Amino acid sequence: MKKLGILFFIFLFGITGCMKYTELNHLSIVNTIGIEKENNLYKVTIAVVDPNNYENEDHYEKNIYEAMGDNLTVAFNHLYLYLDKEIYIEHLETLILSNTLNHKDIDNINAYFNNKNNNRNSFTVVYTNSKIKDIVSSTTNINRLIQTNSENISLVHPLTYENYLKVLYEKKYSFIPTIRWENNELAVVGYSYFYNNKPINLLTQEENISYNILNNDIDNLNLSIENKYYSISSLDTTLTYNNDKTDITITSLIYSEEKEYIKKYNKYIKNIITHFIEKYSYFDEYTIKTYTKGETNEK
Amino acid sequence: MVNYMEKLLTKIKKDIGPSQDFIFKEMRFLDKKITLIYSEVITSTKLINDFILKPILNAESEKVLVPDVYEKIYSILPDNNIKKAKEYKEILTYLYNGFCILIVDEKALAIEVREDLSRGINDPTNEPALQGPKDGFCENINTNLGILRKRIKTQDLYIETEEVGKSSKTKVGILYMNHICEKSLVKEIKDKIKKINIDGIIDSGYIKRYLGDKNSFFPTIMSTQRCDNTAMALLEGKVILLVDNSCYALILPTFFIDYFHTPDDYYQKYLNVSFIRIIRVLAFIISIFLPAYYIAVTTINHDAIPVNMLINFTTQRLTVPFPALIEALLMSVSFEILRESDMRMSNNMGTAVAILGGLVLGDAAVAAGIVSPIMIIIIAISAISGLAFPSIELTSAIRWWRYILMFLAAFFGIYGIFLGMLLLVLSLARINNYGKPYLYPFAPFYKKDLEDSIVFVHQKEKRRNKYLTKNIIRGKQ
């Protein structure tokens, strides 16, 4: 019994966190990681929160560190040339992937993060054509930028690393929110389409909306159809799988009771979604039904 | 005869030694020499005058000769507690118990003239009653028994007494309701009391050590100053021990959940009581687990708290040179020292100690970078939560488990806390509580008795604990 007890404690020391005991003040809390390729080497850029100058999640200072290596592990290890504290990525908020990465690099990045068992998969993934350092150094909160966009104009919706992997392994493709550094400001561009981790193209505005509709990620949508303004206060999409066929039902609530107006809206929605599905082979067989309820403020 | 009396007095004087409180008063009654012996510190001079000297002087003035002076004195004394001491040993026992010894020829009478040295019935200072009766036990066992008799006026309240302590010869009262309490339980307690081999019982706390579970931090015997609490326990089928010279009654056996209840609970609306009981359970959990959780999340499981909080904690810990465990131990020990000093000081100085320790030292420690403000908050919340219970034994048990959990958290993180939780439950479940399950009604689970555990719906007024008695329904004789 005593031997069992001793063995139990030895195992406990091994399997629990005892081995990763680190005091809080010995951690470099990383909130953003950007990865790009330069001269055939991986270049990792990290933003480390400066706890001495942290007021709240919107007002804080961060220190930027860059390191290069022929693989990600080496690149991350090279960061210790500049850091006096352990890199802590368990609370990572954003992972930025550069357009300089090819599909093999993205495979390697996925493998690297999948093999690290100490990070959460709830950080968001974004893609960019701009220089990583510009984006990482920006004072704009990337997650907040995408979230605000989603809530107001529904161009893009935040993509967590967990969902990114799920879609990637199920369907081989992914749509990653894309941002750009232009005129010294961060801007949301839309989704970038990836097939087998290979970046293919940037989606158009209609395609962005269609993707969000199909994923039921529309919070608030404003459209201009044939020079008429449409404000959609609620849009709910249901996907029903019937053998190999997918029945798509879209229920909308718009601020108008005019029949012609509603008819045009339904037609538009059907058109853009059909176009999106056909272009990206999103479903093999499908039907689209739209139910739109008009409503005015006068009651 | 005179020789025999002289010999007896010499022997008594020799046995009591140089003690100056014993008075030897010689007088004559109907031409016979009689001697009064008493201790002036434990007897009442007024009682001696009124109930011994005055009747003797009145009888003496009548000048009626009687054949047996001893019997005459026995018959004229109006005191209701007069004993004929037949053996020398008895004389000494009575003498030390507040009796006056009257020696006539070779015979001795012991007349009770005990001075009431107790401080009377006062408020229970350590268990203040917010509502309900304010009378607390005092150091006089007879007064305490009287208080209980006043509350339970039935022949079913049995009071048995034992004498414990070779030197102190302390009277221990064993009280129980004959028609409710299990006979086997009473017998077991009596047997244990009889086996106590000690020279003196100074307080009921001495007995507790012999009757409770020695291997557990948690209390199995409840000490209380409150008479209503004791009367409630009697009616539940528990056994009460009253010890002379102690203002604390002992209630046994008790269950874990009993320590989360107070007598006041039964004088208030059940919704309010349920809320307060939930708060007490929360206080118990916070007190044991909060410092451990803080240590775990700041040293091993950093991902268990939101990032803002993590950065906030980091900012506060930047200047602290100690690991979180040492910092927590430093603060906990400081608090224990502060509490101990505050308890031992008089009230006036206690306030100064609290201000100096709580405000000045706390603030200075943070300013000097020895501890972080968050650690002061954690330890203060934890310590205050531990004081939410009237039982000092429970507070001590909480303190031990808090330290155990802190070490487990520092070595194993949140796994360690779960391991500690498991050990805590195991240690509670294995407590030897006179054969009664300590964790009842949670383990073994009994839904009906849960009605008076954490959430309160006045169940205690209707039903008794099935592990205490077979007479479960209240009001049934």
Image: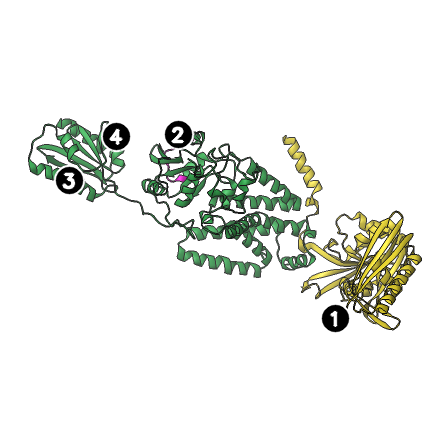
The magenta segment is B192-204
| Horizontal and vertical percent position of residue A255 | 79, 69
Q: Is the same chain shared between marks 2 and 4?
A: yes
Residue A81 counted in the magenta span: no
Count neighbours of disc 4 (C-alpha within 10 A) and say few if under 14, some if 14 to 19, many if 20 or more. Answer: some
Q: Colour of chain B?
A: green
| Horizontal and vertical percent position of residue B107 | 18, 28
Q: From the image, state whether disc 2 or disc 1 is nearer to you.
A: 1
Amino acid residing under circle 4: Glu
Give residue A235's mark.
Answer: none
Which chain wears yellow?
A
**Quarter occupied by the C terminus of chain B:** top left
Q: Which residue is mark 3?
A: B53
Q: Are marks 3 and 2 in contact (CB under 8 Å)?
A: no
Dot 3: element: helix
Amino acid residing under circle 1: Asn
The chain ID associated with circle 2 is B
Q: Is A31 situated above or below B187?
A: below
Q: Which residue is mark 1?
A: A297
Q: Is the same chain shared between marks 3 and 4?
A: yes
Disc with the residue nearer the chain's start (3 vs 2) = 3
Give residue B194's mark.
Answer: 2
| CA separation in Å, label 2 and label 4 | 21 Å
Count neighbours of disc 2 (C-alpha within 10 A) and say few if under 14, some if 14 to 19, many if 20 or more. Answer: few
Task: Name the image quarter holding residue A55.
Answer: bottom right
